Amino acid sequence: MVDGIEVIGVPSLRAAAEFLAGSRMILPQQPYAASARIGHCHDMDFSDIKGQAHAKRALEIAVAGRHHVLLVGPPGAGKTMLAQRIPTIQPELTLDEALETTKIHSIAGLLDGTPLIRQRPFRAPHHTSSAVALVGGGSIPKPGEASLAHHGVLFLDELPEFHRDVLESLREPLESGAVHIARAKRSLVFPARFMLVAAMNPCPCGYLTDPRRRCRCSSTKVQAYLAKISGPLLDRIDLHVEVPAVPFETLTQTTTGETSLQIRTRILKAKVRQRHRLEPLGLRSNAQLRHRDLSQACPMTAEAARLLRSAMQEFHLSARSYDKILKISRTIADLAESDEILPGHIAEAIQYRSLDRQLWV
């Protein structure tokens, strides 16, 4: 799997001795990269999901720009189904990504005889997980779920049920893409550049936004429930998406939506545009854009700039939200094959940052 190394495969110790003695010829193995393809092999598809066009669109944007996303909706709306199908629309692992992912799983002792991780990881730790289990560490430091999700998806279901200190431990990897663990004699760095997908109910009973069920939670209980997620953590999640309950009529439809292949095809085209623009900056995705890069990477029309300024004032959005909206708009423009960010791109991006103001204020 590693370039520049000649590998001679031998069936036995006798064969090795004969080869070294020159009495037996064994040809070198072909490099793995030349003979194997790291592809998709999933038994799920986005066409399985009825309705939820808005949520599907948001996940397409999230994958195209590697943005973090929060899904908010009542029980049974399909949040987990949506999250589980994200790997089916992600680009294939490159060989370098596969090797890096395999190394992390090897350190954690999770390969189980698998020579190479071929699919992007999808990690879904339980809400009772500790901070060490999530970000790594311990007396003998090992990578946590955040690192095991490197180049893949970290799915946190029932987000407010995680302990607050556990959630706050994610702030470093969300910001830097790595976990730093300091010990008395050494310091370790575990890569953790994952796509965070979180899901939660809008209130303790779950039915605050469900038109068919009555919410029985008091406003005090709702605020206490939502306050479990800190503002700084919420600001680091790019897209906040409301996932409504699916009507019965939609569930019984015989027509199917777009397949994962159709969605992935658009994402791959957007990725090509990103690569040409971001390679000179040493970046891989729009989500990695730094504040100083935005003016160069995110040109927008005057009308789009006026719309963004108006939204910042009306919704009282933070400076970090401003950066997030620009990055999301850039990804939407890439999916639309547009070099400039247009008002429609800004308007769509704004709605993914307004949900937190509706629920958390």
Image (cartoon, rainbow, N blue to C red):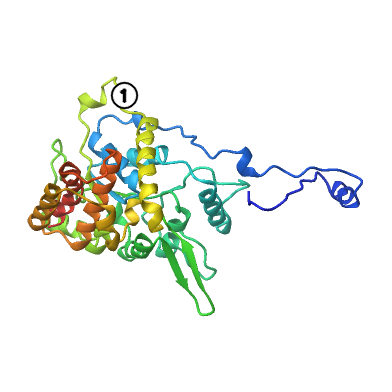
Q: Helix, strand, or loop for circle 1?
A: loop
Vertical position of residue 230 compared to residue 278: above or below: below
Residue 61 horizontal/vertical position (percent) = 29, 43
- Which class describes the residues within 10 Å of circle 1: few (<14), some (14-19), or many (20+)? few
Q: Of 296 and 34, which appears nearest the observer?
A: 296
Give the residue drawn at x 60%, y 48%. 112
Which of the 4 image quarters holds residue 323?
Answer: bottom left
Q: Which residue is mark 1?
A: 256
Give the residue drawn at x 16%, y 51%. 354
Residue 218 horizontal/vertical position (percent) = 11, 53
Residue 145 can be seen, yes or no: yes
Q: Of 234 and 282, which appears nearest the observer?
A: 282
Give the residue drawn at x 35%, y 34%. 263
Vertical position of residue 295 compared to residue 55: above or below: below
Which of the 4 image quarters holds residue 324?
Answer: bottom left
Residue 240 horizontal/vertical position (percent) = 23, 49
The quadrant the C terminus occupies is: bottom left
Which amino acid type corresponds to the residue marked 1 in the rendered image? Answer: Thr
